[in-house]
Amino acid sequence: MTQVGIMIEGQEGLNWERWRRICTDADTLGFASLRRSDHLISLMGDPERDCIECWTSLALAAEWTKRIEFGPMVSPVTFRLPAVLAKQAAAVDRLSGGRLILGVGAGWNENEHEVFHVPFYTQKERFDRLESGIKIMREAWAASNPKPARNPIPLLIGGKGARRTIPLVARVAAEWNHSTLNPDMYRSLVEVLEQCCRDIGRDPKTIRRSVMTSYIIGRDPSELRERAARVSEIIPGLKSLTPDQVLENRRQAWFVGTPEEIAGQMREYAKLGVDLFMLQHFLLDDGHALRLLAEEVIPAIA
C-alpha cells in the first residue's frame, strides 16, 4: 500500500505556532509520516524567514502527536557530533514511544555553513564522516541509557550516488529517499540498490522506498490558480510567472491538479515500487490543502 507523508522545509518560515498546527493536522488527518528539514537559514535567499531549530521542534512533535512517525529529513553530520546526535535522537524516540525515523546526511549547503561558521569539509570528508558517524551513533545507543525505544533507531538516507550513497543505503538504512519525480532515474537507481542488497545478502524489500516532491492541489481551476499564486510568493524561481504558468511549469516536477488527478498521478508512479510519497508543504498556513490530501487523495491510492 502506497502511503503519503508531509515534508516541511523548516527554514522557509516555520515558527512554533505553525509547527504545532502542522503536527496536529498531520497526526489527526491520517498521514503516514511527518518530516522536516534540518537547516540553519533559508535556502531561497531570504534570511528574514523564521527557521526554528530542528531537534527542539522534534522533541515537541513527540509531545504534540500521538500516532504519526516523524523525524528529520535529514540531519547533516556536519552540524553535530555523532554521539550528541545519537543522544538527542534517543531522547526524542523514547519520548515518542518509538516513532522517530532518523534521517542523516553528509551535508550539502555550503552557504549556511559559512554563515554560521560551521566547518564544511570536502565532499569526500563529509561522506567519510557520515559513514563513521552512523557507526558511532549505534555504539552510543548500545553504551548509554535510556536507550531508544527502537534500538537501533531506523535510519533514512537519501541520495542518488551509485558509488557510495546507494551502497550505504543497502548496508544500514531502513528507508531510501529519492528527491525528484524522474521515473527513468528512479528505475535505474532501484536496480543499483537491489544489486547492492543482493551483494550483501539483504532482501531489498526490507528497505522502504520514498519519493519527495511537492504538490499544488485544488478542487477546481480557480482554487488551483489561487494556490499557484501563493506558491509563487515562496519559490523565487516562480515569482515572475502567472498562476497558469506556475501550474504548467510544475506539472512535470510536482503533483498538480484536483484530488482525483493527483491520485491518478500517484498511482502511476507507485507502479514503480514507491512505498511512500513525501510531499513538501510550502504553504505553511494552508490546512485546507492537507485536508484535501487526507480526505480525497490518500483513500484513492490506498
Image (spheres, rainbow, N blue to C red):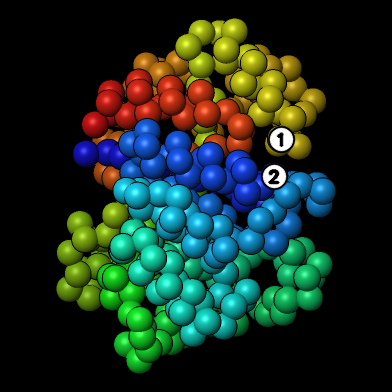
Residue 81, compared with residue 110, is above or below; it is: below
Where does the image place residue 105, in percent across and percent down from the top left? 52, 68
Name the residue located 57 percent from the left edge and 69 percent from the top edge. 76
Element marked by disc 2:
loop
Residue 68, compared with residue 252, is above or below; it is: below
Q: CA distance from mark 1 to mark 2?
A: 9 Å
Residue 284, compared with residue 92, is above or below; it is: above
Q: Are marks 1 and 2 in contact (CB under 8 Å)?
A: yes
Amino acid under disc 1: Ile
Residue neighbourhood size for the residue with mark 2, other residues' Cα within 10 Å, grouped as few (<14), some (14–19), many (≥20) = many
Where does the image place residue 150, in percent across and percent down from the top left? 28, 70
Residue 128 shown left or right of residue 52 in the figure: left
Q: Earlier in the sequence, mark 1 or mark 2?
A: 2
Front residue of this view, candidates 283 and 64: 64
Where does the image place residue 269, in percent across and percent down from the top left? 34, 34
Q: Is residue 64 visible?
A: yes
Residue furthest to the bottom = 143
Residue neighbourhood size for the residue with mark 1, other residues' Cα within 10 Å, grouped as few (<14), some (14–19), many (≥20) = some
Residue of label 1: 234
Element marked by disc 1:
helix
Name the residue located 27 percent from the left edge and 26 percent from the top edge. 299
Residue of label 2: 13
- Which image quadrant for residue 131? bottom left
- Which image quadrant for residue 298? top left
Name the residue located 32 percent from the left edge and 48 percent from the top edge. 67
**Quadrant where the C terminus is found in the figure:** top left
Amino acid under disc 2: Gly
Where does the image place residue 204, in percent across and percent down from the top left? 22, 60
Q: Which mark is residue 11?
A: none
